[in-house]
Image (spheres, helix red, strand yellow):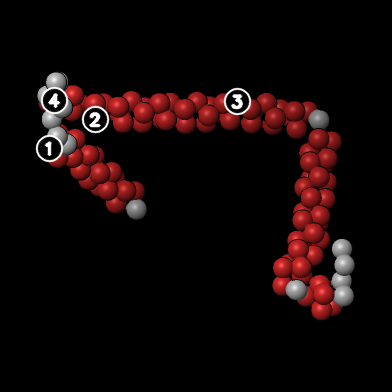
Amino acid sequence: MTRVLGWLAALGLLAGVAAGFGYAPREAIQGNVQRIMYLHVPSVLTAYLAFGLVLSIALTAVASKAIAGLLDRYRILGYIGVAIIVYVGIEMVYDGGFQVLAATGLDETLHIHH
């Protein structure tokens, strides 16, 4: 799958270059020099996105290490977290059941009111 995506990316890049340098009309004042923007601007935006992605991954790693340290030191935080997750799960199933009954009209049929 990765190999296919690589070939599709290369094909897309070639299509973009062909469209930017071949298909796009010449600019009236700058001529062909202006066409470099069709390649340069998307490249810069892609670089910004890649930098942001790497930065977010790095910050996530730092935060997870800090949280793991806290959970290792204070085990009660882990138990509190599990209790919150169980409570929210039960609440979602309970309320979701009533929403499904209301959406299907079964609450009126079965005379169930929340």
Cα distance, mark 4 to mark 1?
Answer: 16 Å
Quadrant in which residue 82 is drawn: top right
Badge 4 local density, few (<14 within 10 Å), some, or many (20+)? Answer: few
Amino acid type at mark 4: Ala
How far across and down, in percent of the image, does residue 57 sit?
52, 31
How many angstroms separate mark 2 from mark 3 (CA)?
35 Å
Q: Amino acid at mark 1?
A: Gly
Residue drawn at x 13%, y 25% as measured from the top left: 28
Q: Amino acid at mark 2?
A: Leu
Q: Which residue is mark 4?
A: 28
Report crowding for label 1: few under 14, some 14 to 19, many 20 or more residues within 10 A (C-alpha).
few
Crowd band around label 3 with a 10 angstrom C-alpha radius: few (<14), some (14–19), many (20+):
few
Dot 3: what SS? helix
Where residue 99 appears, as percent x and y from the top left, is: 76, 63
Left or right: 82 as drawn, with respect to 17: right
- For this rendering, which residue is in front, 86 or 78? 86
CA separation in Å, label 2 and label 4: 19 Å
Do residues under tags 2 and 4 come within 8 Å of each other at their CB atoms?
Answer: no
Read off the residue under disc 1.
22
| Lower position in the chain sequence, tag 4 or tag 1 | 1
**Sequence-first disc among 3 and 1:** 1
The residue pinned by badge 2 equals 39
Observer-side mark, 1 or 2, equals 1
Q: Earlier in the sequence, mark 4 or mark 3?
A: 4
Of tags 4 and 1, which is closer to the observer?
A: 4
Residue at which label 3 appears: 62
